[in-house]
Image (spheres, rainbow, N blue to C red):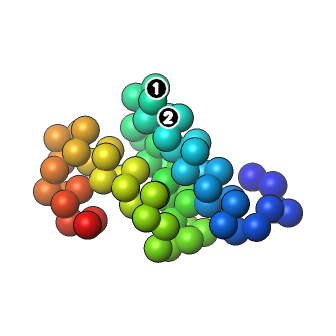
Amino acid sequence: MDPTLSGELQADLWILRGQAFLGTREREKAADAFNQALAIDAENQNAELGLIRIAVASGEREQGMARL
């Protein structure tokens, strides 16, 4: 990631990367990307939503609901 970009923009790019990985069903890579976004912006709702989607798609609905 380009360190000259603002933190918010970096988080948004990680989220886009995570969504792309979800689209190709690469859940582990998607989770890593969403977690990177959360490391930059701990309250990023889009990153949380991405992790919830992964949990539900993986059959871990309770874990996903716990993130709400």
Marks 2 and 1 sit apart, C-alpha to C-alpha, by 5 Å
- Asked whether the residues under the numbered discs 2 and 1 touch, taking CB atoms below 8 Å apart as contact, a structural biologist would say yes
Q: Is residue 22 above or below residue 55?
A: above
Q: Is residue 36 above or below residue 16?
A: below
What residue type is disc 2 on?
A: Phe
Q: Position of residue 44 (x, y in %)?
A: 49, 67
Q: Is residue 26 above or below residue 31?
A: above
Local crowd size for mark 1, using a 10 Å CA cut-off: few (<14), some (14–19), many (≥20): few
Tag on residue 21? Answer: 2
* Quadrant assignment, res 68: bottom left
Q: Is residue 41 above or below residue 18?
A: below
Say which residue appears at 80% left-offset and 62% top-offset: 5
Q: Secondary structure at mark 2?
A: helix
Farthest top residue in view: 24
- Taking depth in this image into account, of 36 and 46 the one nearest to the observer is 46
66 relative position to 39: left or right: left
The residue that label 1 is drawn on is 24
Say which residue appears at 58% left-offset and 45% top-offset: 16
Q: Secondary structure at mark 1?
A: loop
What residue type is disc 1 on?
A: Thr
59 relative position to 40: left or right: left
Q: Position of residue 61 (x, y in %)?
A: 16, 50
